[in-house]
């Protein structure tokens, strides 16, 4: 299919070019006699290069072989489909991940083979049974004749005048006026798709005295837990009040997305003495929002020796020893800090809400609300 | 009795339809439609066929998929996640995978077809761009095609977000983060789209209706329009002895092209089915359900979002500003929205920019050879380089790990590469084009190198040149002088027109000069006239010298 513009090669491939078709090919195009005794197909002889009969016969056999392969593969698909079971009780069941993979290979493989064989058979059909065509049709000239254009313009303008749309200004303008509110209506109808932001994004459920729990286990965290933590870092959430019906099933994803923190412990001397909220730390324990201020991925990686917090998405890097100031990367502002203290029973608690709005940086994220 | 008369049953159906629609003449004309043959014309076909496969497999998936964010605790066939909290959307995707025979296969077919759909759109667009097939009268079809590309990318992103697995939720989070960065309106847009704060419980049902209804309907309409315009205007073709601006050469719709295209559909489907059967894609059961507090390092988006991921990674926050305490995070706005806008709208406006620069308003049916439009080709290669660098930057963590380079060093390398790479690519590609033009000119004049070496009586070795075929001569002569039609407009006294003297006129003239200045002229080159074809065994050194001069003269 790449050699259409190289007729020399065509001849080398044994194609009969520009010659009247022989007797053999009459069976293909029908015995309809032509007055000029030339080619009898739907396309002129010099555009239709018919294969010799033996080539066509071989092509037919190859194509038929492919189609038969497709048939067998299609039958194979049924076998594969009913061999596997969808319910876990019967064997082999696709409920087992390994079996699911094999079922996928069997079901998909048979279909792929059937599809491929049909494609191959059709390609052989086109290339060896069907004549090779090189048909010409003219491109259209696109601009209409000036008379046609003039006639159209004349008709259109007369119609427009006749309708009164041009002359009757009051009617035209009131119609356009009438359209304006209707055009805006669909936008207004979308108003209730969501609430206004208000100051929602500025506040989380963290309150003074609220305990912290390990994310995923709900284990309340004591000061000592961080000493035993080899990475020096724990992902934590606020402890929800189970008596509150709103939190009977734990924190909602919305609440988690805003309140999740990184609890980090380091030697107290490691903190930068000029860190703004050094008094929000407790015995070397500092808490920052885990949600990156760039576009909101969890900044989940912490390197103990350099005190760096790294967001794996876009690699914003924050210095945990210096108020999570940005060391590298695209983030706009430091991770918001959460004040940490301990309560009477020795559990870590929040001293209040974050220093600024957690999450991706938005227009008024750094302004108090 | 005519043997070519259709069988009675077919005649009956044909007459039934024709009695009602009068279609015989139009039907024959369309069956005689010509489709030029070249491998590069199959790229658009791959896109069309993978779209059909997407529709078919997508309908299958909707029979089980439940786009609900209701929180459930899993208790099903996939033992490893029993007792884990997740959304209904994720649960129903697990059900599709482990309780529906062929469900995993169809999911993988859908995902692979989507990847191939966008990829074939890109390659199809590159083919059209580099061969200038977007020129008049086909600009509108090009704009439709670019819109299809944009919608396909968005459609892919939305589909990726539906199963509510960990990477899919992270993709949504990034989308929301980018939205939030918009000054003034960002938080409103995000609140309205998500029905509240992130993630809420509405985004998946909303994306679902966009993904399975709105966007596919628009895509289908645009694809239909794209195809009807192609049908009406007829396909472009590459230059050749018979191929002219007036005559379209190729295989007829019926029977050759129909069967060929049908076979190619089955091939496309077979490749996608084969990939779906044997190459795992998006194994959401291994990723786990979405949680806004967790992430896995090294996660990669689908390939077509890679350039955005890369631009978000390497664009520094050096230009971020705060105005009266209000944040303008340019490190999100520029790479997230600016670059995306450039990639989507740049192609759409290019045909009009090029026509404005060159002043070429003629219709074109014979496609350009890329070398014959060196500036355009250079710009295209520069754009590919820009996109490619961003795309690679989207996996800089993996590159850093694989090649043991510091992560931050890779960022710096990409920051430099994204600026320098396209410039170098432009210069190199343009020079290669001009070199090929010179070689074409030489081949046209002196014939082609036959590979036969002769020794002359003087002892000198020469390579025998042979005359190019008639077809080759046509191909080589398809290079027309680049038009600068009304840019040089002066009146009869040699005074520049006011339009030319305006700022835009000056700009246009400068661009036209830049666009055409280095082009190799074929003026006065007569095919196969060169002396190399007329060796009589006594070529003198002076003539040889003369030849090398000719080649160097542009």
Image (tube, coloured by chain):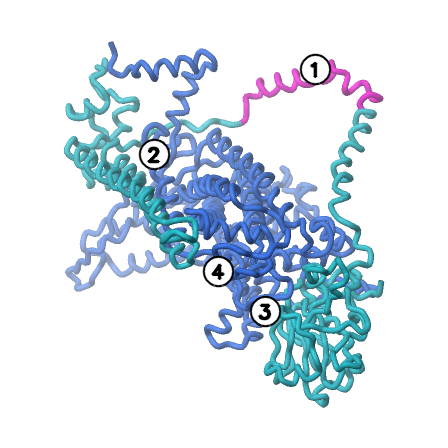
Chain colours: A cyan, B blue
Where is residue B2 drawn, in percent x and y? 25, 12
Please indicate whether residue A193 sits to the left or right of residue B415 in the image.
right
Secondary structure beneath disc 2?
A: loop
Secondary structure beneath disc 3?
A: loop
Mark 1 sits on what residue? Answer: A158
Mark nearer the viewer, 4 or 3:
4
Mark 2 sits on what residue? Answer: B242
What is the C-alpha distance between the residues marked 2 and 1? 46 Å
Which chain contains the residue that carries disc 4?
B
Of residues B367 and A367, which is closer to you in this image? A367
In the rendered structure, find residue B79 and report the number of the disc placed on it: 4
Tell me: residue A126, above or below residue B31: below
What is the C-alpha distance between the residues marked 1 and 3? 67 Å
What is the C-alpha distance between the residues marked 4 and 2? 66 Å
In the image, the segment drawn in magenta is: A143-172
Which chain contains the residue that carries disc 3?
A
Mark 3 sits on what residue? Answer: A312
């Amino acid at each position: 299919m790449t050699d259409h513009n190289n007729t020399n090669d065509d001849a080398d491939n044994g194609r009969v070019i520009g010659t009247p078709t022989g007797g053999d090919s009459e069976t293909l195009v029908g015995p309809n006699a032509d007055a000029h005794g030339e080619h009898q197909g739907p396309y002129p002889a010099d555009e239709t290069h018919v294969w010799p009969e033996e080539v066509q016969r071989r092509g037919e056999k190859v194509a038929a072989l492919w189609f038969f392969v497709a048939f067998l593969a299609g039958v194979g698909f049924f076998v594969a489909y009913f061999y596997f079971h969808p319910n876990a009780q019967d064997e082999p069941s696709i409920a087992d991940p390994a079996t699911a993979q094999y079922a996928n290979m069997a079901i998909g493989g048979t279909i792929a083979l059937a599809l491929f064989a049909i494609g191959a058979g059709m390609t052989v059909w086109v290339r060896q049974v069907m004549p090779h065509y090189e048909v010409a049709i003219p491109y259209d000239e696109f601009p209409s004749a000036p008379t046609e254009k003039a006639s159209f313009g004349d008709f259109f303008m007369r119609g427009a005048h006749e309708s009164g749309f041009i002359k009757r200004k009051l009617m035209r303008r009131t119609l356009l006026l009438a359209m304006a509110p209707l055009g805006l209506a669909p936008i207004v109808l979308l108003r209730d798709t969501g609430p206004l932001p208000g100051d929602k994004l500025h506040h989380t459920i963290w309150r003074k005295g609220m305990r912290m729990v390990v994310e995923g286990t709900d284990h309340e965290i004591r000061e000592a837990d961080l000493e035993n933590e080899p990475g020096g870092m724990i992902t934590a959430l606020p402890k929800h009040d189970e008596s509150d019906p709103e939190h009977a099933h734990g924190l909602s994803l919305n609440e988690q997305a805003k309140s999740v923190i990184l609890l980090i412990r380091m030697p107290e001397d490691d903190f930068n003495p000029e860190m703004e909220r050094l008094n929000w730390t407790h015995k070397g324990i500092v808490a920052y929002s885990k949600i990156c201020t760039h576009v909101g991925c969890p900044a989940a990686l912490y390197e103990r020796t350099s005190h760096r917090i790294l967001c794996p998405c876009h690699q914003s890097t924050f210095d945990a020893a210096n108020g999570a100031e940005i060391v590298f990367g695209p983030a706009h502002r430091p991770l918001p800090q959460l004040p940490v203290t301990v309560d009477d029973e020795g559990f870590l608690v929040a001293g209040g809400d974050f220093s600024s709005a957690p999450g991706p940086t938005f227009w008024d994220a750094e302004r108090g609300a | 009795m005519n043997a070519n008369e259709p069988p009675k049953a077919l005649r009956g159906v044909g007459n039934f339809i024709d009695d009602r629609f009068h279609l015989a003449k139009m039907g024959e004309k369309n069956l005689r439609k010509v489709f030029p043959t070249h491998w590069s014309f199959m790229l658009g076909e791959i896109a069309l066929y993978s779209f059909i496969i997407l529709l078919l497999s997508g309908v299958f998936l909707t029979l089980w998929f439940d786009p609900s964010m209701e929180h459930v605790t899993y208790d099903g066939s996939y033992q490893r996640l029993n007792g884990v909290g997740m959304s209904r959307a994720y649960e129903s995707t697990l059900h599709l995978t482990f309780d529906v025979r062929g469900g995993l296969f169809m999911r993988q077919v859908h995902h692979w077809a989507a990847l191939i759909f966008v990829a074939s759109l890109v390659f199809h667009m590159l083919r059209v761009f580099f061969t200038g097939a977007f020129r008049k009268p086909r600009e509108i079809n090009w704009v439709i095609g670019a819109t299809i590309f944009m919608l396909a990318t968005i459609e892919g992103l939305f589909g990726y977000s539906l199963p509510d697995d960990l990477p899919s939720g992270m993709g949504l989070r990034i989308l929301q983060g980018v939205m939030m960065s918009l000054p003034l309106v960002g938080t409103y847009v995000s609140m309205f789209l998500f029905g509240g704060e992130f993630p809420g419980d509405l985004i998946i049902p909303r994306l679902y209706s966009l993904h399975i209804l709105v966007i596919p309907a628009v895509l289908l309409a645009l694809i239909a329009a794209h195809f009807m315009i192609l049908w009406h205007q007829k396909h472009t073709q590459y230059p050749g002895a018979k191929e002219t601006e007036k005559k379209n050469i190729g295989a007829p719709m019926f029977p050759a092209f129909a069967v060929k295209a049908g076979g190619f559909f089955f091939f496309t489907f077979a490749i996608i089915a084969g990939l779906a059967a044997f190459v795992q894609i998006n194994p959401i059961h291994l990723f786990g359900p979405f949680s806004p507090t967790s992430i896995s390092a090294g996660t990669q988006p689908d390939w077509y979002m890679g350039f955005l991921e890369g631009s978000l990674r390497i664009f520094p926050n050096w230009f971020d500003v705060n105005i009266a305490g209000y944040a303008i995070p340019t490190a999100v706005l520029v790479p997230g929205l600016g670059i995306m806008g450039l990639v989507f709208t740049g192609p759409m406006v290019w045909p009009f920019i090029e026509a404005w620069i060159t002043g070429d308003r003629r219709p074109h049916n014979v496609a350009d050879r890329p070398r014959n439009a060196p500036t355009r080709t250079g710009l295209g290669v520069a754009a590919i380089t820009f996109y490619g660098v961003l795309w690679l930057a989207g996996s800089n963590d993996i590159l850093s790990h694989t090649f043991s380079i510091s992560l931050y060093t890779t960022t710096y390398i990409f920051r430099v590469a994204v600026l320098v790479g396209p410039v170098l690519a432009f210069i190199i590609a343009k020079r290669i084009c001009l070199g090929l033009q010179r070689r074409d000119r030489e081949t046209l004049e002196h014939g082609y190198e036959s590979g036969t070496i002769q020794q002359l009586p003087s002892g000198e070795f020469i390579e025998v040149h042979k005359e190019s075929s008639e077809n080759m001569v046509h191909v080589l002569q398809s290079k027309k002088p680049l038009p600068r039609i009304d840019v040089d407009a002066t009146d009869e006294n040699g005074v520049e027109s006011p339009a030319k003297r305006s700022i835009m006129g000056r700009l246009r003239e400068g661009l036209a000069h830049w666009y055409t200045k280095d082009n190799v002229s074929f003026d006065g080159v007569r095919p196969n006239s060169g002396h190399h074809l007329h060796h009589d065994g006594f070529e003198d050194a002076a003539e040889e010298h003369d030849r090398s001069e000719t080649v160097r003269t542009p």
